Amino acid sequence: VRIVCFPVTICVGNKLKNAYAESNLDKGTIRINKKRHYESGYKRINPTKDGHENMTSTLYHEILHFHHPRASEKMVRRMEKSGMSRMSDKTKKKLLAKLN
């Protein structure tokens, strides 16, 4: 899986309500709610082994929204699932490093 990054600002927005992340196509920003990924009591979409939400998967999901702005949420989730399964550990670490 090759991730092409274009001018996108990736930042942490822990004040997002009811969302793991949001992307704004007009401003070119992706905001990730790190706090929500680790809080208990939420339904997990892509849980890690310790039960928290997978932040790498969330970030990849939002990048897919930028690459395919007209794709439905169902289609983006399918692409995310197949892309994450084919992605190497090295690429996942590079993707997560963009957040820090």
Image (spheres, rainbow, N blue to C red):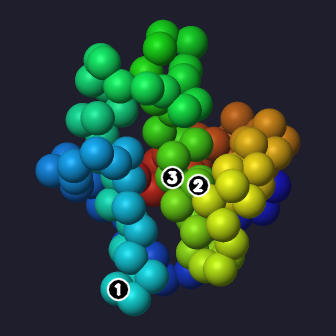
Note whether 2 is above or below 68 in the view shown. above
Residue density around tag 1, few if under 14, some if 14–19, many if 20 or more, within 10 Å = few
Image quarter where the N terminus lies is bottom right
- From mark 3 to mark 2, how far is it between C-alphas? 5 Å
Q: Are marks 1 and 2 in contact (CB under 8 Å)?
A: no
Q: Amino acid at mark 3?
A: Leu
87 displayed left or right of 46: right
Note whether 42 is above or below 1 in the view shown. above
Residue at the disc numbered 2: 61
Residue that protrudes farthest toward the top in the picture: 50
Corner quadrant of residue 46:
top right
- At horizontal 56% and vertical 12% (from top left) the residue drawn is 49
- From mark 1 to mark 3, how far is it between C-alphas? 17 Å
Q: Amino acid at mark 2?
A: His
Between 60 and 7, which is closer to the camera in this rendering?
Answer: 60
- From mark 1 to mark 2, how far is it between C-alphas? 18 Å
Q: Are marks 3 and 2 in contact (CB under 8 Å)?
A: yes
Rendered image: mark on residue 59: 3
The local secondary structure at tag 3 comes to helix
The local secondary structure at tag 2 comes to helix
9 displayed left or right of 18: right
Rendered image: mark on residue 27: 1
Q: Amino acid at mark 1?
A: Lys
Corner quadrant of residue 85:
top right
Between 41 and 8, which is closer to the camera in this rendering?
Answer: 41
Lower sequence index among marks 1 and 2: 1
Q: Position of residue 31 (x, y in %)?
A: 33, 60
Q: Position of residue 35 (x, y in %)?
A: 24, 35
Lower sequence index among marks 1 and 3: 1
